[in-house]
Amino acid sequence: MGVSAKGRRRISYQGQDFVWWVAPDGDDCDRMYLNIVSADKSIVLAYKVDGESFSVISKGRCLCGRKMPGTWQRCRLPLAEPLMVVTPRDVAQIIAWAAGDGTGEDRVK
């Protein structure tokens, strides 16, 4: 079963389709989160958009070319500064980091 794209933005990276959106998380006092999900759900990310966070929660099966245990894992994003406003460019850079090996050109700038 795929990811619902209704009312959400789509982006492709190296032939892999992703859906992303920013919405409040009811489990975290309605704080705003950037959510990024690959079409096959192998990459599932949640990033708290608050201007202070440098970490992302990985809920998927792989991240940076490594298999993940499937449980929630908090990982540090190599951001120069935390995001206050999310742009498609920011999303593309996070996807490049998450879908790549986490080094070199795949790093978030």
Image (cartoon, rainbow, N blue to C red):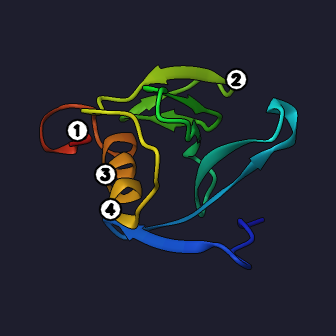
Q: Which residue lies furthest to the left in this view?
A: 104
Image point (41%, 62%), residue name:
87
Circle 1 is placed at which residue position? 107
Give the CA distance from mark 3 to mark 2.
24 Å
Q: Which of 40 and 27 is in front in this view?
A: 27
Of labels 1 and 4, earlier in sequence is 4
Question: What's the mark number on residue 39?
Answer: none
Comparing marks 4 and 3, which lies closer to the viewer? 4
Of labels 3 and 1, earlier in sequence is 3
Q: Nearer the viewer, residue 83 or 57?
A: 83
Please tell me in which quadrant of the rendered image residue 61 appears.
top right
Element at label 3 = helix
Residue 27 drawn at (x, y percent):
86, 33
Give the CA distance from mark 4 to mark 3.
6 Å
Element at label 4 = helix
Circle 4 is placed at which residue position? 89
Q: Please, what is the three-letter code of the amino acid marked with disc 4?
A: Arg
Q: Please, what is the three-letter code of the amino acid marked with disc 1?
A: Arg
CB contact under 8 Å: marks 4 and 3 = yes
Of labels 2 and 4, earlier in sequence is 2
Image-based side of 47 in relation to 13, left or right: right
| Label 1: how many Cα within 10 Å (few below 14, some 14–19, many 20+) | some
Residue 65's place in the image compared with 36, above or below, is: above
